[in-house]
Amino acid sequence: MTSPHLPHPPHPSTPARRGIGRWIALVAVVALVSAGLGVLVGYLAFAPTDEGDGGGARANAETACAIAARMDPDDPLGFDSEESVLESPEYGEMTAVYGLAQAAGAEDEAYADLGESGELIVQSYRQFDEDGIRDAFAELERACADLG
């Protein structure tokens, strides 16, 4: 039996519209890349640098000294408080003082004493030596005073 309907001829395939969509995407990508490169070039050309003047080391040293000055010299890690030393703000400050002092000493030899004081603080803490921590903070305060 034959079908009363004639077979349909195959539909011609219509080409996809590629024109305007691809151009918009291309322009958007070029604009984003250009903007990113422009920001990068601007930053590299006009960003302040600390090369040669020890600005980064000086900033680290000043910040370490400012944090150490806020700490209680008799109980720098808050051993007398009820909370765990690891959860106290003093522990975080001690860690910051150590890191900043070490960074200053590593970057500029003029801050070597400050870096050594920071190292003594951490060594004393690792040994749970409260008197050593107090002595190390006193040494750090002297090193800060010497900075002027």
Image (cartoon, grey):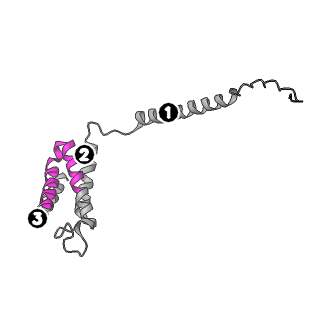
What's the CA distance linking mark 2 and mark 3? 29 Å
Label 1 residue SS: helix
Q: Residue 45: x and y, percent?
A: 41, 33
Q: Is the residue under label 1 in contact with that under label 2 (CB below 8 Å)? A: no
Q: Which residue bears the numbered disc 1?
A: 38
Main SS category, magenta section: helix
Using a 10 Å C-alpha cutoff, classify the residue at mark 1 as few (fewer than 14 neighbours), some (14 to 19) or many (20 or more). few
Q: Residue 125: x and y, percent?
A: 15, 61
Q: Which residues are magenta?
A: 97-126
Give the mark nearest the N terminus, 3 or 1.
1
Q: Which residue bears the numbered disc 3?
A: 129
Label 3 residue SS: loop
Image quarter in which the N terminus is found: top right
Q: Amino acid at mark 3?
A: Asp
x 37%, y 40%: residue: 48
Count of picture labels: 3
x 21%, y 54%: residue: 98
Single out the mark in the foreground, 2 or 1: 1
Residue lying furthest right: 4
Q: Amino acid at mark 1?
A: Gly
